[in-house]
């Protein structure tokens, strides 16, 4: 069990206590402290129940999880945000689900917003421009009470099979923050690994507790990484059309900003200037252009592990899709 942390504090302690209380006892808790200040080890609950890896600076989410995974030989590897709290049967229920068939390489729990009966995610969806969004976000859990196949799990709380990770690789550390779960999930689906949604495995999440719900920094990482993930993973015909879907999403962001709703509305409410967004988009595109040789090399590596044909993959993504307007609205 990998729990990266940047801020430590009582939320991390509560997260660790929830893992200690799991009905599935055969597990190890590894907290990876990116604070550079020893914040995790300062907490009694963490010192008593977890092994702590301390980094001198912030290595990012993916690198922190990878550090924990590399120190384990468990056949199943779980990840949880430090601002999430798991119900007691969360881990046991997911392990049982992932053991059901070899092809299941990922498991997505039902994630609710902390202290509410409202969903954060029931797996993830993908927009045609590579943007990912939580399935069922802000809806009732009762609407997502059926176990089913989903595209991939949210990195907030997920279970991965080691056999899958040994084949396709770990989180992409170049992303640093945001979209690591999207990239890993899409690479896994190219290799025909499946993802089980398990509604009886419940986690509560303080949404964006560490990084904030809307900020210029978050917008930069999400847009930059969305482009990187698209170049690496989308079939060529989809990638060629992605800019048009992005344009539609930008249009709806602008509409919702004027209404004070959606992510763009929250961005404006946070005190950020609306004119920052076009600059962030431009910077993200310039960054990806500069990174293109490396991204194309990574794209070729993804294809080397692929068992699915591009047309079949495109149909899979379409069956788990979300519109540009809906992405902007949430």
Image (cartoon, rainbow, N blue to C red):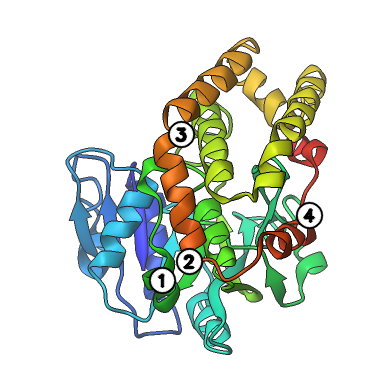
- 67 relative to 253 in the view: left or right: left
Is tag 3's residue or tag 4's residue first in the polypeptide sequence?
4
Secondary structure, mark 2, is: loop
Secondary structure, mark 3, is: helix
Q: Position of residue 2 (x, y in %)?
A: 35, 63
**Residue with the mark numbered 4:** 139
Q: Mark 3 to mark 4: distance in Å?
A: 38 Å
**Residue with the mark numbered 3:** 292
Q: Mark 2 to mark 3: distance in Å?
A: 20 Å
For the residues labelled 3 and 4, say whether their Cβ atoms are less than 8 Å apart.
no
Is tag 4's residue or tag 2's residue first in the polypeptide sequence?
4
**Residue with the mark numbered 2:** 305
> In the rendering, which numbered label is found on residue 167?
1
- For label 1, count other residues whose C-alpha is less than 10 Å away and answer few (under 14), some (14-19) or many (20+): few
Residue 219 visible in the picture: yes
Could you say which is closer to the camera, residue 240 or residue 192?
240
Q: Which of label 1 and label 2 is nearer to you?
A: 2
Secondary structure, mark 1, is: helix
Could you say which is closer to the camera, residue 174 or residue 209?
174
Q: Residue at x 44, y 60 (%)?
A: 80
Q: Position of residue 292 (x, y in %)?
A: 46, 34
Q: Which of label 3 and label 1 is nearer to you?
A: 3
Could you say which is closer to the camera, residue 179 or residue 296?
296
Q: Residue at x 46, y 71 (%)?
A: 160
Is tag 3's residue or tag 1's residue first in the polypeptide sequence?
1
Is tag 4's residue or tag 1's residue first in the polypeptide sequence?
4
* Above or below, comparing residue 13 to residue 277 in the picture: below
- 192 relative to 264 in the view: left or right: left
Q: Mark 4 to mark 1: distance in Å?
A: 35 Å
Q: Which of label 4 and label 2 is nearer to you?
A: 2
Q: Position of residue 145 (x, y in %)?
A: 76, 73
């Amino acid at each position: 069990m990998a729990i990266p942390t940047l801020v430590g504090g009582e939320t991390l302690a509560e997260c660790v206590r929830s893992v200690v209380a799991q009905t599935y006892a055969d597990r190890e808790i590894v907290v990876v402290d990116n604070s550079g200040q020893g914040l995790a080890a300062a907490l009694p609950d963490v010192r008593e129940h977890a092994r702590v890896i301390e980094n001198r600076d912030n290595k990012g989410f993916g690198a922190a999880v990878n550090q924990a995974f590399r120190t384990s030989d468990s056949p199943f590897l779980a990840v949880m945000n430090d601002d999430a709290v798991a119900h007691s049967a969360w881990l046991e229920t997911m392990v049982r689900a992932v053991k059901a068939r070899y092809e299941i390489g990922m498991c997505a729990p039902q994630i609710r917003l902390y202290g509410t009966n409202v969903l954060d995610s029931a797996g993830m969806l993908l927009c045609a421009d590579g943007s990912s969004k939580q399935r069922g976000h802000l809806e009732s859990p009762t609407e997502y009470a059926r176990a089913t196949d989903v595209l991939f799990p949210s990195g907030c709380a997920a279970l991965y099979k080691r056999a899958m990770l040994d084949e396709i690789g770990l989180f992409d550390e170049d992303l640093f923050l945001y979209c690591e779960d999207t990239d890993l999930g899409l690479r896994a689906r190219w290799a025909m690994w499946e993802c089980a949604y398990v509604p009886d495995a419940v986690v509560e999440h303080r949404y964006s507790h560490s990084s904030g719900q809307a900020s210029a920094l978050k917008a930069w990482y999400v847009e930059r990484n969305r482009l990187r993930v698209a170049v690496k993973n989308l079939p060529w015909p989809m990638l060629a059309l992605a800019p048009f879907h992005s344009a539609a999403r930008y249009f709806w962001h602008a509409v919702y900003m004027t209404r004070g709703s959606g992510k763009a509305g929250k961005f404006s409410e946070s005190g950020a200037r609306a004119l920052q967004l076009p600059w962030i988009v431009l910077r993200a595109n310039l960054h990806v252009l500069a990174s293109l040789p490396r991204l194309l090399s990574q794209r070729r590596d993804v294809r080397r592990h692929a068992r699915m044909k591009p047309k079949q993959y495109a149909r899979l993504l379409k069956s788990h899709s979300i519109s540009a307007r809906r992405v902007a609205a949430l």
